[in-house]
Each structure stands twice: as structure tokens, then as C-alpha cells.
């Protein structure tokens, strides 16, 4: 039967999966180890694979020398607000796209999907000029507006899949009991598909948290920079300070990893829902 | 009222039995008639999304497309004349463009093939249950949570010629005597950025293929096993044909995505040394940063054109194959 596995096959499988695990985890391990080494230890031979002295000097330096605290707060503020609004707006559009049939529906879905295919960089220049005219360059509110727009297409498609799994008898019952449609949506449907909504929110949050090219183009002042923009500044200087760089990378990666760990199951569902039908 | 007897498929008739005065036109697919109220509520629900996407994505994108035919340079805004295909001619006359095209080809093919093979292998091996499989999946899926830009930073540090761990490990194993300046040497830089991209992208393939594999009914394998088919035959004659549409579409999406993915290269080399790791999108971004929006937009249109032609050929090719199979 299919569940039998020969000994060599078993050994190959375990070996392969084991090696792949090491390859996957190693870069993360390495950046964490680097971030806890003293600056002297980072640039000395032979390389050590475990810090001889655990030092938080690199982390302290980030907050003392660079305004890393400001960058973290900016990233937190911008990503949270953008992700909340993007998720709310996408919920409305996804709901309609999952529940109603109308003539322009196919075209609309296509319009959302196309935004995922075309290089968004073609919009970078014009977007900058538009934001100049709106006086929203170097402005957190401006970046939030753009991030909301960028998040909407994918989270709409993702949430639509989750809505499709909720039987519409639920809101019909609520509406017969006198709920308005929007009331039914928020009081009946939303509680049922909470995991999907949380996943969409996290997905949006992480995307905004990680976004680089838009924020580099639009944010100039130090007090407005997000973490990726600041890191981009670090790497374009001639001598990269790898100590603070790795500490900054760790601080950036950890929150997103924790969030993804919570939501990965649902994000995977949302991603694969559309693809696995044929 | 006989509501309880109505099976779900016949929901339209259930709603027809609802009390008069109830606006049934709102119900999903229950009516052919398009009531004004239904239209308005659809519009109300959709409009926030539409407004945002139209203003911040479509408008600049369309603006960008027309800039491609103008002389549009941030450093000289007095002359934004219509230049027809002037920007395109400029690009085609630039020898760097052909280097960049070649690099893009190497980048896409060199990334997609190893990603696909490794992702497929992982997915196949993850199908079988084993202790801590959930934990294992969570661990190998983690690159996902990290942005391409940060991956680039991680690998830039590991490929550092003096204090990079890659050289150190290779020297320990005895494969090299002198450190390789991975990112500074034009002949190895592309290899290094591609390795980083392969590492990053395998997860995506593993997820998509694993999901597809789980859609293959077990009965198929059982029947084949009864007929005495071996593992390899099952893979090629059942598994792959069953999920080939998903595989083909995943590859297509991924090619488009990798083509448009400048982040890793941007962080690792910025396109250098000597343009050897510039792909079309990184080149486009550095053109944008120089302020030459006209040429950058023209490059964007060239990318769209290349991807459209590629997708069209690809889709035709997989359709023909399907006919042969069925």
C-alpha cells in the first residue's frame, strides 16, 4: 500500500528534510548570533559560531546613535492604521464579490488581479508627483493612504475566499430578524470568520511593515522614516556597520515572524484557495 | 411554509416564499432581476475599495504609461515634450539594456528551476505524516514572514568576502583556499543573488504544491498500487498529471513575480558590480531615482510587454500539452 516506505527511501527523506531545515534556519541563526557579538568579535578571525561574550551593545547603539525607536514607532503606527483600514475596506468589497452576481464582477476581479501582475514601479514616479501636488510627500498620512490602496486588491481576493465558505443562510436569518445588510455583515458574519479576517489583517500589516520602495521614494525626514527606509540608508553608506545592521534586522524580523506563526495556517488557506481548483 | 424541506440548492424558491415586502433582490444569485436597491448596495460596499485603487494605483499607472512617451526628467521639468518612441529608442540604443535583459533571463530561469524542484521534493516528502510535522512546517516556512529586502541583507552579510560565513564554511570543508569576493566579482555576483532568491522562494512552491497534492484523491493511488504501479510511475502518471494545471499556473505566476522582484538584488548588490546583477526592475528603479521618469516608464511598459507575450505563449503551450494528454 501507499503507506509503506522502504528503508533507503526513508533515510533519503529524513536526510533531505533535515538538511533543508538547517539550510532554512541557518541565515536567521547567523544574523541573531552576529547581533549579539561585540563589534570587535564580528570583524575578527577565526569566525565564531557562538558569541564568546553576549553583548547587547549593537542593540543599545541602535537607539542611542540612530533614532531606531522613532523608526519602530513610525512603522508600527503606519502599518497598524493602514492594515486596519485596508482590512475593513476589503471586507466590504470581498463580501459583495462573494455574495452577489453582477455584470462587471469579472472585470472588477481582473482589475484587482492585474495590480498584482504589473510592475508597480511604473507608478512610482507619477505617484511621487501626485503626492507632491497633494502636499502629502514626507507625510505619514500620505503613506498610509497609499499602503491602504496597495493592500486592498490582494486582501479582497483572500477574504472573498473566506466569505465564500460561510453559508449565506446565516445573514439571511439575521436579515429576516430585522438586521440591515451591513448589520448582518458585522454582527453575524464577521464573528464567524474571525480567523480569516485576522489572517488578512496580519498579512496586510506585515506587507506594510516590510514595504521598502514606496517609503524610500516618499519619506525623507528622519522623523518620518519607517524601518526599511532606515535600513536602506544603512546599506547605501560605504562602510556598513554589520553589528547594528544585524541587530536592526533581528528587531525587524522577529515581530513579523511571531505574527505569521499565529496566522500562517489561514494565510496559506487564503493563498492556495484560488489556485487549487484544477 | 415548507421551508424546512427545501434543500440548499433550491434556495431561490425558499426566498420566494418569504413574506411579501421583504427585499429579496438582495439575495445572492437568487434573482435575475436587477433591482435599484441591490445595485446601490453593491456600489456602496465596493466604492471605498474602488476609490482607493483607482486613485493610488490605476491613476499613477496610467500617468506612468503616458510619461513613457514624454521627455520627463525631474532635473529638467521645463521641457516635458511629447517624444513619441524617443525613450524607447534611447533604451534600445543603450548596450546596458541588453546586459540587463540577459541578467534578467539568468535570474528568472536560475531561480525558478531550483525553486520548483526543491519545492516539489519538500511537498512530496511533507505529505507523509511524521512526528512534529506541524512544527517542521512552521520552521521551514519562516522565510515567508521576512521581506525580500531583509533577506538580501541577511545574504549580503553571509556572502561578505572577509567575514562572511559562506567563505568560512567553504574553507572549513576544504573547497576553497582563498576567500571568494562573491558580491564584488562580476562572475559570482549573479550566482550569489540567485542563491538567495532560491532559498527565499522554495517555501512558496512547497506551500502551493503541498496544497495541490492534498487535492489528489487517495483512491487513485490505492487503485494504482493494486495494479502494481511503482512509486516513480505513480508520481509521473498520477500525481503530476492530476495537478499539472496548478503546477503550470503556479510556475507562470512565479515567473512574473520573480521578473518583477528587485528587493533581494537591491539589498545585496544594488545592481553592481558593473551592472552585472541589474535586472530590468532594479535598473528601472535606479533610473527612477535618477529622476528620469520618462525612460523609467518606458522600461516599465517594456516589462509589461515582455510579460504579456511570455504569458500568452506559455498559456498556449500548456493548453496544447493538455490536449495531447487527454
Image (cartoon, coloured by chain):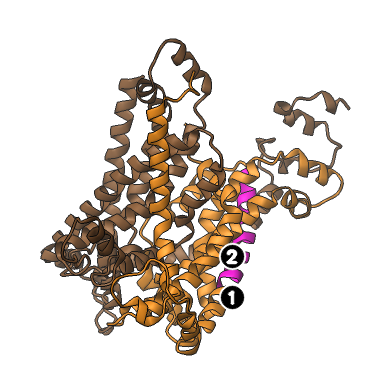
Chain colours: A orange, B brown
**Could you say which disc has been placed on residue B212 in the image?**
none
Q: Vertical placement of A1 versus B38: above or below?
A: above
Does residue A79 show up magenta in the picture?
Answer: yes
Q: Vertical placement of B246 versus A212: above or below?
A: above
| Secondary structure of the residue carrying numbered label 2 | helix
Residue B106 visible to an observer of this rendering: yes
Q: Do labels 2 and 1 share a chain?
A: yes
The residue that disc 1 covers is A77
Task: For marks 2 and 1, give the CA distance.
Answer: 10 Å
The residue that disc 2 covers is A83
Q: Which residue is drawn at 62% across and 65% down?
A: A85
| Secondary structure of the residue carrying numbered label 1 | helix
Choose top left, top right, bottom left or bottom right for residue B70.
Answer: bottom left
Residue B66 visible to an observer of this rendering: no
Most extreme residue toward the right is: B1
Q: Which residue is drawn at 43% across and 63% down?
A: A29
Q: Residue B159 at what x, y percent from top left?
A: 28, 65
Q: Residue A86 at what x, y percent from top left?
A: 59, 63
Q: Residue A15 at what x, y percent from top left?
A: 39, 40
Magenta highlight range: A77-99
Identify which residue, A4 or B279, lies in the foreground: A4
Most extreme residue toward the top is: B227
Does residue A213 show up magenta in the picture?
Answer: no
Choose top left, top right, bottom left or bottom right for residue B195.
Answer: bottom left
What count of labels does the image hold? 2
**Which SS type dominates the magenta stretch?**
helix
Amino acid at each position: 500500500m501507499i503507506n509503506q516506505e522502504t528503508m533507503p527511501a526513508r533515510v533519503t527523506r529524513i536526510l533531505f528534510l533535515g538538511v533543508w531545515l538547517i539550510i532554512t534556519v541557518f541565515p536567521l541563526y547567523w544574523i541573531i548570533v552576529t547581533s549579539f557579538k561585540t563589534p570587535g568579535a564580528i570583524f575578527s578571525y577565526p569566525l565564531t559560531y557562538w558569541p564568546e561574550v553576549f553583548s547587547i551593545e549593537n542593540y543599545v547603539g541602535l537607539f542611542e546613535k540612530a533614532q531606531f525607536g522613532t523608526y519602530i514607532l513610525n512603522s508600527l503606527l503606519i502599518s497598524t492604521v493602514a492594515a486596519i483600514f485596508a482590512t475593513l475596506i476589503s471586507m466590504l468589497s470581498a463580501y459583495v464579490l462573494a455574495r452577489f452576481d453582477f455584470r462587471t464582477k469579472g472585470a472588477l476581479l481582473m482589475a484587482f488581479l492585474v495590480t498584482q501582475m504589473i510592475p508597480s514601479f511604473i507608478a512610482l514616479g507619477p505617484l511621487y508627483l501626485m503626492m507632491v501636488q497633494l502636499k502629502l510627500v514626507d507625510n505619514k498620512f500620505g503613506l498610509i493612504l497609499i499602503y491602504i490602496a496597495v493592500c486592498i486588491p490582494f486582501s479582497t481576493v483572500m477574504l472573498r475566499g473566506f466569505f465564500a465558505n460561510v453559508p449565506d443562510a446565516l445573514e439571511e436569518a439575521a436579515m429576516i430578524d430585522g438586521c440591515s445588510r451591513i448589520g448582518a455583515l458585522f454582527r453575524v458574519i464577521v464573528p464567524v470568520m474571525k480567523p480569516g479576517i485576522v489572517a488578512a489583517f496580519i498579512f496586510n500589516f506585515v506587507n506594510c511593515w516590510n514595504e521598502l520602495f514606496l517609503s524610500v521614494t516618499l519619506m525623507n525626514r528622519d522623523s518620518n522614516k519607517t524601518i526599511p527606509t532606515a535600513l536602506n540608508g544603512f546599506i547605501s553608506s560605504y562602510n556598513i556597520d554589520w553589528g547594528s545592521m544585524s541587530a536592526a534586522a533581528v528587531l525587524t524580523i522577529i515581530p513579523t515572524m511571531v505574527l505569521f506563526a499565529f496566522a500562517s495556517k489561514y494565510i496559506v488557506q487564503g493563498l492556495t484557495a484560488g489556485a487549487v481548483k484544477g | 411554509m415548507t421551508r424546512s424541506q427545501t434543500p440548499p440548492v433550491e434556495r431561490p424558491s425558499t426566498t420566494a416564499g418569504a413574506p411579501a415586502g421583504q427585499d429579496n433582490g438582495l439575495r445572492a444569485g437568487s434573482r435575475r432581476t436587477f433591482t435599484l436597491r441591490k445595485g446601490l448596495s453593491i456600489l456602496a460596499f465596493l466604492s471605498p475599495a474602488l476609490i482607493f485603487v483607482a486613485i493610488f494605483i490605476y491613476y499613477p499607472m496610467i500617468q506612468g504609461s503616458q510619461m513613457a512617451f514624454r521627455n520627463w526628467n525631474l532635473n529638467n521639468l521645463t521641457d516635458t515634450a511629447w517624444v513619441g518612441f524617443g525613450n524607447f529608442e534611447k533604451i534600445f540604443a543603450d548596450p546596458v539594456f541588453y546586459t540587463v535583459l540577459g541578467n534578467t533571463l539568468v535570474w528568472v530561469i536560475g531561480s525558478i528551476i531550483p525553486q520548483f524542484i526543491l519545492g516539489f521534493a519538500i511537498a512530496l516528502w511533507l505529505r507523509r505524516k511524521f512526528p512534529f510535522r506541524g512544527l517542521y512546517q512552521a520552521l521551514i516556512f519562516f522565510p515567508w514572514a521576512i521581506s525580500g529586502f531583509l533577506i538580501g541583507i541577511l545574504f549580503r552579510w553571509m556572502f561578505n568576502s572577509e567575514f562572511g560565513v559562506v567563505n568560512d564554511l567553504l574553507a572549513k570543508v576544504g573547497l576553497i583556499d582563498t576567500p571568494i569576493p562573491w558580491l564584488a566579482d562580476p562572475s559570482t555576483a549573479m550566482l550569489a543573488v540567485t542563491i538567495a532568491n532560491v532559498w527565499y522562494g522554495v517555501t512558496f512552491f512547497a506551500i502551493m504544491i503541498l496544497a495541490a497534492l492534498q487535492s489528489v484523491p487517495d483512491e487513485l493511488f490505492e487503485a494504482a498500487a493494486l495494479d502494481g504501479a511503482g512509486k516513480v510511475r505513480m508520481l509521473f502518471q498520477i500525481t503530476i498529471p492530476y495537478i499539472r494545471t496548478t503546477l503550470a499556473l503556479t510556475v507562470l505566476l512565479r515567473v512574473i513575480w520573480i521578473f518583477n522582484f528587485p528587493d533581494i538584488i537591491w539589498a545585496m548588490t544594488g545592481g553592481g558590480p558593473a551592472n552585472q546583477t541589474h535586472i530590468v526592475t532594479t535598473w528601472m528603479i535606479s533610473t527612477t531615482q535618477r529622476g528620469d521618469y520618462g525612460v523609467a516608464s518606458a522600461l516599465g511598459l517594456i516589462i509589461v510587454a515582455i510579460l504579456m507575450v511570455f504569458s500568452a505563449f506559455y498559456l498556449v503551450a500548456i493548453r496544447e500539452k493538455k490536449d495531447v494528454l487527454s
